[in-house]
Amino acid sequence: MIILTGNDLKTGAVTWWNGADWSLYVDDAVDVGEQAEEILAREEALRRVNVPYSIQATREDDGKVRPAHIKDRIRALGPTVRPDLTLKPQSPEAIDWVI
Amino acid sequence: MYSYDHYDQAMVDARVEEFRDQARRRLEGKLTEDQFKPLRLMNGLYLQLHAYMLRVAIPYGTLNSRQMHALGDIADKYDRGYGHFTTRQNLQYNWIKLEDAADILADLAKVEMHAIQTSGNCIRNISSDHFAGAAADELVDPRPYAELMRQWSSFHPEFTYLPRKFKIAVIAAEKDRAAMRLHDIGIQIVQNEAGELGARFYVGGGMGRTPMIAPMIRNFVPLDQLITYAEACLRVYNRYGRRDNKYKARIKILVHELGKDEYTRQVEEEFAHLLSQGIEPPLAELERIRTHFADPAFEDGTKQVDRSDPDFAVWVDRNTHRHKHDSYVSAVISLKPVGGIPGDATGEQIRIMARLAKQYSFDELRIMHTQNVVLPHVKIADLHALWTELETAGLGAPNMDTIEDMIACPGLDYCALANARSIPLAQRISERFDASDKTARLGELKMKISGCINACGHHHAGHIGILGVDKKGTENYQLSLGGSEAEDTSLAKITGPGFTEDGVIEAVDKVTDVYLEQRQGEERFLDTYRRIGMEPFKEALYGA
Amino acid sequence: MGHDLGTSPDDVQFRFRDDEVVDHGTVTVDACCDQTNATAVRIEPGDDARVLLPYLDRIALVEVNFPSFGDGRGYSAARILREAGYTGELRAVGDVLIDQLSHMRRCGFDAFAPDKRLDEEDAARAFATWDNVYQRTVDGRRTIQELRHE
Ligand code: HEM
Ligand code: SF4
């Protein structure tokens, strides 16, 4: 699937396109298919999100979304060397998902 | 150390207001990201993987306890409770909100700090010897010259849109502790036969994709022509540096393509012309700046360290440096605890270091390019008390210049340009070497890790260097040996095919074993490598 | 000589001189050196401003083109001309934006013809950015270092 991501203009936080808005959680990301360019242009013009771009990802059997590149998996979770600052501070094993 | 007068303060204050206005226009949607990007970059604000990152300039790595304290407060108030000290002797915050950036700059301005020219194709923060003004072996304190150049390079009207970024280092000792010849311009303050001080210019060094060691282009520039000569070097670069290819735009490529002699000829010609223009600041200004760097009131005291506590003795041996006054030493606070993140310090730790500087070091601190902190002037009599406090704060790691004191860039955990993570490697290597006690046996071993070819982690200049590369979407690491950024500058050579994360840690283990087997006498890793060459290491790594 | 090259007087948004605006087009640097009657010339980023030095007496307008704001060669070109004593109009044209105005002024530009007209108020603020300056340039301003030691 093709999903969209960027950084929130105000906070810089990593966000994912959920079909209507930008979510902090990669699992909310939706497949935009052919519409990537159109949504990116529109959202860029609205200036809520900084330099949004499209990436390849897969939806796993449990419904979770996994970006194809490690860089975007680190973006989705947070720094692997600071589990306390990731989106899942309670589960350090989440780091394994990145790698 | 230097403190602003109303002129300096007004320059910085003006910049804060200007940026506040720019950020407001961006948040209100009046500026596009394309228009805003160069403006935020000129104020050190990057967009990284997880948030905005703010890079704060620490001119020639010197700061006082009030400034250090403010850096700790900013970490707690606007970031997530920590900051990252870099190889450029700066500090980076990793979790900054655009909405807060102008307020942070205002907080910095209150303590005479800023983020000006910490990014962009301009003259960047000037770096220097972290033991400047304290080291027993220096000719003079290099910082007055660095400060003169800071002023000259701030908002320079001709050199704000250079082909590429531009880094200058100033030292004044034969021992190079600032990687001087790996800068775009490296300046060594020297004395001529008549006993006069002058500046020796090296131009065209750098790391990144094409590492180069700067050749010397002028043996002696009189101090009342220093700025004029620098201006000539920059003007030739601004006019003829390549602008067609970002990777060939650094001055090192220009010097390389023209040849050192032709570049030098052009600089000398421009210099002769600029001398007629009277652009040099008055020498009285250098005198004024020098008074700011006058020695503090050193007092005679104990010259002997009480070594009865063995842990303390190890720390003294590793982490202190000879001072020009024999009752003092410079003490290195390691930001490389075993398993820790190189260069990171919490807001609380930063404030503790500020307090210790006030108490024990005439209010002064230095940031090292090796991502540690120095208290430059500590009484030998106070050393044990200082060490005890450092231990309590988790800042007492006795590992300066050992393999555990490695440089590591932020890598893929933070950096948008990275190919691979650097920090986990640093953590695992320090844990492994510490546990096996090998660190001590290896002695001085400078290890440097970069997460991509930009070489922020100086891997080209490591006795052992590691470079993260992308191998079909997975992290892979190249190992290199034989680099040095000291006065015996050399560039490391790649051993051969790359390794996985586990593989490269094994590989580091193996090459250090080769050294331990082969070393003669007092040889460091680097010396043994230089004597026996790459082959024995290759054999250990890849088999016959 | 037509208007095939360069900006017309109408394009000049800011001008800090009182003399008449040169009302004909500019020629390339090469052409300017060849034609003994050329009085207006346009410098592109790759041109060497120094080849014009023998002809400065007859030149009344030099346009320095900035095809993109990030290419800073024009700043050196401008200073070189002023340092050689050029007193005619020095016009910055092309991708000239608010945040470059104060630096350009300091390098000797006294006329500005931006591709996109700039907000007058923003520009006025930009020209007045620095109460004082650290470097001595061709704008003749006394530097902070000089003021400190008066
Ligand atoms: C995370 C944000 C960072 C970004 C986006 C970044 C970006 C870059 C880039 C693009 C280069 C290549 C420059 C070139 O070759 O032209 C570079 C080089 C460099 N950076 Fe960084 N960097 C970052 C962090 C750091 C840190 C944390 C340090 C210190 C630990 C650092 C110190 C350096 C040094 C010393 C170089 C090599 C300079 C040279 O080529 O001579 N940077 N950086
Ligand atoms: S070396 Fe590469 S990965 Fe490391 S900080 Fe620099 S740009 Fe980022």
Image (tube, coloured by chain):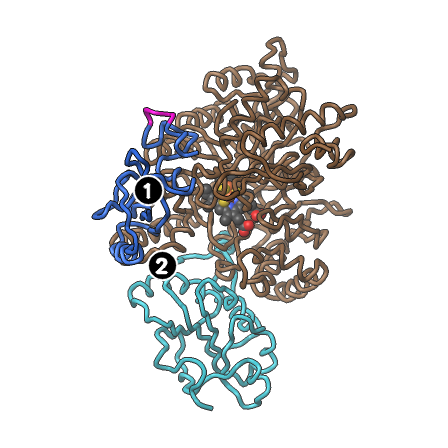
Chain colours: A blue, B brown, C cyan
Give the SS element for disc 2. Answer: helix
What numbered label is drawn on residue B35?
2
Q: Residue at x 42, y 51 (%)?
A: B41
Taking the spot 65% from the left edge, 49% from the top edge, the residue there is B212
Task: Point out the frontmost of discs 2 and 1.
Answer: 1
Residue B465 image point, x, y percent = 61, 36
Name which residue lies at 73% across and 33% down. Answer: B544
Q: In this view, does B121 lie above or below B392?
A: below
**Percent of width and height locating residue B235:** 58, 62
Q: What stretch is highlighted in magenta?
A: A89-93
The three-letter code of the residue at mark 2 reads Gln
Q: Nearer the viewer, residue A21 or B245?
A: A21
**Picture quadrant of residue B352:** top left
Parent chain of label 1: A
> Residue B30 vs residue C12: left or right?
left
Taking depth in this image into account, of B423 and B478 the one nearest to the observer is B478
Q: Which of these two is toward me, B167 or B502?
A: B502
Q: Residues within 10 Å of mark 1 (few under 14, many from 20)?
A: many
Discs 2 and 1 lie in a common subunit: no
Q: Mark 2 lies on which chain?
A: B
- Give the camera-side residue of B273 and B300: B273
Answer with left or right where residue A69 lies relative to residue C53.
left
Q: Mark 1 points at which residue?
A: A14
| Amino acid at pointer 1 | Val
> x and y percent of residue B167 in the render?
56, 49
Residue A91 on the magenta segment:
yes
From this viewpoint, is residue B321 visible? yes
